[in-house]
């Protein structure tokens, strides 16, 4: 017998098992909207009237189990009443599911996110299907919200508090095998036996694995200590006033048994307004990311572009890493440079990375290494679907190279330059079909920076641009379409920001204070550290090109004259060792022996124990950001924001939203502020 709702379908079989299939109407993925939740409640009413022996909840979508709550509904919340209703809706419904008198089984195949994982947690048994797409996660924190539908209450019981907090505070995904190993899932089965396994476990549910002794202690009797230490860890990465959600998650678990309706302030945090708009802005960033992805979709009439072979010319810092990244994305890559000796270091670097990434999977490691082929003569050019040039920033060299490449490349191949400062129009001058050349501008380090600028020159063909954007999506990067102009978007907005920082140093401000102001604002690192990272010589050249300053800042020029080029030379605005800034604290600690370090950490643990368990205290609050530091940050960021607006006005980037997206994903601009132009609007900044 089958009963249909709009989004759910309930079938009873001969063994008195009820199979509930979630297949959201009109959508390719399952998300938990108000209507879906109301229907689930009605399904439970129906089951109450004649309880089955067991209930198996599964997905009718090939894409996955459940992608989470409906973000569109969440974005439309306009007040605390609506936010409160949204939290209660899931919290109460899942509590009801958790209490049903029959065995409930969640059969998880493919993605299982947020509210989907919470639904699974409300079931008595979780079965995960062992396939690469299966991932369970509670990523709410990344949107500035909390797993309020029972995740905070149930996950720690299943996997223990340390692992549960790790999942909830990072939002990271857990694959099928790991989910089983950590106790999140009760069984991990191959796809072909998944229905049989779910049936068997519904009829004879397994007993729950016991938590190991230490994990048990940290979850129950020493709960306060675990919460205390988790807050200290969070405080190292995020300020409370910028990102309240992780703090709320820890509190809600430790003090309110994970009940979101019991913790004051949660509803306000989600609804936004006076108490901060972090959640709204992070949801905005989520939507902006989607907008960037849109640019990489095929456009009608331009065809779908599939890249199997990539050829990279120039095996330096950028070319080597671009080649390795493409190989990791499943493409066969040929890597060219002037001779084999110049290619070797890039291959060694790539192999080290592959080794780290696939430390336990020799087959995957071998496959990816096999896909990265040194090619000193450029024999891969004729077969490549994408050719990326990343040779030195020298116009005649690039012109000559493309004149040659355009003769040898396949007719439909993407021809791209990674140039950061030359005009596409100039580079293509010797090409037979100049309209084919497009800029594909990666950022350094390639594997960490999610944004890639796709640069269209005057007359660049729309197909070339769209195909380049499709390629960038295929290597899991976010394409931002920009017009050919000095510095495109990201470097163009960073240059006046760095200049302002160095002017402040020239005025006598301490380097560390300037950086602290930017970090206090929410930037991932200060501008002076950033200059050290990109190289002072590069900053000097970029400044001359991208700002109207008649002379370079004295603090920069003097260091470049002395050969102090930043991280790469060991000395810049800071002193560097092994890619890290050498601070006095670190140096003195480094000099201590291991025993002294062990004593220090034991001492720290004892202080935590006393504070958390005996004195029942919360960790000390972070010192507030001084008014002076806030004023410095305003001054520092103003040129960046004003330049972003100017580039939108000039049409270098198509909209204010895309400019915000580009600056967030290209520079790390404080995501909780929603982007530079969103921030300017909310602060009523005068950008004239
Ligand atoms: P690099 O100096 O590390 O590497 C350049 C490589 O190109 C060298 O190995 C050199 O031997 C090779 N090369 C020079 N002429 C060649 C030719 N005719 N044929 C084959 N190989 C040749 O340079 P890097 O930093 O990797 O920059 C490369 C390009 O990427 C430049 O256009 C630069 O503007 C751009 N870029 C650099 C970024 C960075 O942070 N370093 C960031 C984004 C773009």
Image (spheres, rainbow, N blue to C red):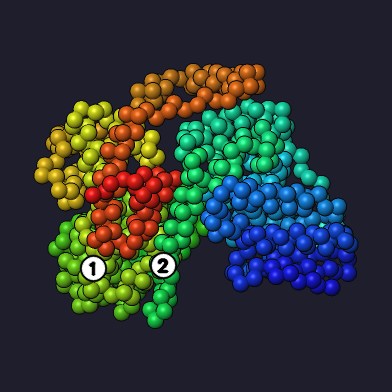
Q: Is residue 683 left or right of residue 40?
A: left
Camera-side residue of 167 and 687: 687
Q: Is residue 638 left or right of residue 588?
A: left
Residue marked by disc 2: 296
Q: SS at mark 2?
A: loop
The residue depicted at 62 percent of the width and 36 percent of the height is 264
The residue depicted at 20 percent of the width and 36 percent of the height is 503
Camera-side residue of 91 and 455: 91
**Quarter-of-image position of residue 339:** bottom left
Q: Is residue 147 above or below residue 19?
A: above
Quarter of the image with the N terminus in it: bottom right
Q: Which mark is residue 457?
A: 1
Q: SS at mark 1?
A: loop
Q: Which mark is residue 351?
A: none
Measured as percent of width and height from the top left, residue 399 is found at 17, 66
Q: Is residue 505 above or below residue 123?
A: above
**Quarter-of-image position of residue 418:** bottom left
Residue 369 shows in this picture: no
Residue 52 shows in this picture: yes
The residue furthest bottom is 301
Q: Is residue 336 left or right of residue 247?
A: left
- So how many labels did they put on this image? 2
The residue depicted at 56 percent of the width and 49 percent of the height is 79
Q: Mark 1 vs ligand 1: CB under 8 Å?
A: no
Measured as percent of width and height from the top left, residue 645 is found at 28, 54
Q: Is residue 164 above or below residue 653?
A: above
Camera-side residue of 258 and 237: 258
Q: Is residue 226 above or below residue 244?
A: above
């Amino acid at each position: 017998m089958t009963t249909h709702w709009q989004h759910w379908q309930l079938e009873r079989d001969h063994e008195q098992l009820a199979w509930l299939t979630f297949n959201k109407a009109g959508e390719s993925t399952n998300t938990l909207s108000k209507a879906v939740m109301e229907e689930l409640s009605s399904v439970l009413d129906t089951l109450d009237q004649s309880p089955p022996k067991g209930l198996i909840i599964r997905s009718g979508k090939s894409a996955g189990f459940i992608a989470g709550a409906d973000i569109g509904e969440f974005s439309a919340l306009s007040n605390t009443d609506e936010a409160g209703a949204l939290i209660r809706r899931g919290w109460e419904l899942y509590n009801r599911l958790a209490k049903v008198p029959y065995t409930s089984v969640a059969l998880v195949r493919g993605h299982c996110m947020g509210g989907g994982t919470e639904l699974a947690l409300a079931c008595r048994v979780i079965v995960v299907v062992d396939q690469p797409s299966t991932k369970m996660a509670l990523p709410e924190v990344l949107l500035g919200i909390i797993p309020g539908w029972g995740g905070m209450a149930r996950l720690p019981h299943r996997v223990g508090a340390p692992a549960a907090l790790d999942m909830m505070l990072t939002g990271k995904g857990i694959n099928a095998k790991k989910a089983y190993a950590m106790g999140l899932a009760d069984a991990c089965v191959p796809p072909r036996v998944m229905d049989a396994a779910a049936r068997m476990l519904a009829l004879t549910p397994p007993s729950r694995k016991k938590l190991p002794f230490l994990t048990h202690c940290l979850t129950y009797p020493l709960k306060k200590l675990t919460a205390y230490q988790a807050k200290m860890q969070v405080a190292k990465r995020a300020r409370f006033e910028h990102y309240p959600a992780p703090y709320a998650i820890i509190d809600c678990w430790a003090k309110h048994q994970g009940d979101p309706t019991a913790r004051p302030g949660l509803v306000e945090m989600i609804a936004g307004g006076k108490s901060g708009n972090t959640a709204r802005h992070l949801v905005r960033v989520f939507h902006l990311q989607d907008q960037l992805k849109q640019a990489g979709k095929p456009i009608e009439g331009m065809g779908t572009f599939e890249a199997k072979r990539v050829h990279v010319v120039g095996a330096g810092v950028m070319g080597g890493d671009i080649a390795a990244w493409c190989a990791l994305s499943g493409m066969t890559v040929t890597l060219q440079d002037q001779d084999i000796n110049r290619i070797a270091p890039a291959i060694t670097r790539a192999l080290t990375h592959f080794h780290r990434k696939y430390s336990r999977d020799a087959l995957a490691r071998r496959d990816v290494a096999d896909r990265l082929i040194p090619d000193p003569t450029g024999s891969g050019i004729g077969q490549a679907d994408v050719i990326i040039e990343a040779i030195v920033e020298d116009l005649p060299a690039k012109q000559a190279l493309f004149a040659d490449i355009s003769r040898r490349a396949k007719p439909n191949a993407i021809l791209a330059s990674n140039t950061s400062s030359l005009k596409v129009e100039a580079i293509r001058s010797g090409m037979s079909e100049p309209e084919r050349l497009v800029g594909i501008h990666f950022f350094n380090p390639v594997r960490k920076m999610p944004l890639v600028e796709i640069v269209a020159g005057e007359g660049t063909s729309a197909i070339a641009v769209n195909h380049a954007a499709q390629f960038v999506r295929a290597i899991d990067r976010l394409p931002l379409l920009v017009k050919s102009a000095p510095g495109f978007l990201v470097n163009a907005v960073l240059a006046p920001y760095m200049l302002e920082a160095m002017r402040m140093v020239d005025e006598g401000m301490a380097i560390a204070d300037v950086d602290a102001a930017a970090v206090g604002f929410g930037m991932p690192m200060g501008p002076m550290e950033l200059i050290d990272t990109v190289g002072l010589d590069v900053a000097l050249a970029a400044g001359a090109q991208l700002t109207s300053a008649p002379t370079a800042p004295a603090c920069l020029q003097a260091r470049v004259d002395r050969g102090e080029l930043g991280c790469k030379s060991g000395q810049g605005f800071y002193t560097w060792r092994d890619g890290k800034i050498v601070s006095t604290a670190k140096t003195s600690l480094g000099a201590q022996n291991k025993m002294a370090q062990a004593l220090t950490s034991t001492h720290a643990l004892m202080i935590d124990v006393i504070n958390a368990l005996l004195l029942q205290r919360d960790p000390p609050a972070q010192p507030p950001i001084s008014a002076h530091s806030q004023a410095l940050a305003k001054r520092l960021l103003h040129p960046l924001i004003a330049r972003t607006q100017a580039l939108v006005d000039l049409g270098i980037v198509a909209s204010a939203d895309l400019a915000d997206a580009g600056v967030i994903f290209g520079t790390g601009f404080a995501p909780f502020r929603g982007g530079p132009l969103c921030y300017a609007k909310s602060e009523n900044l005068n950008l004239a």
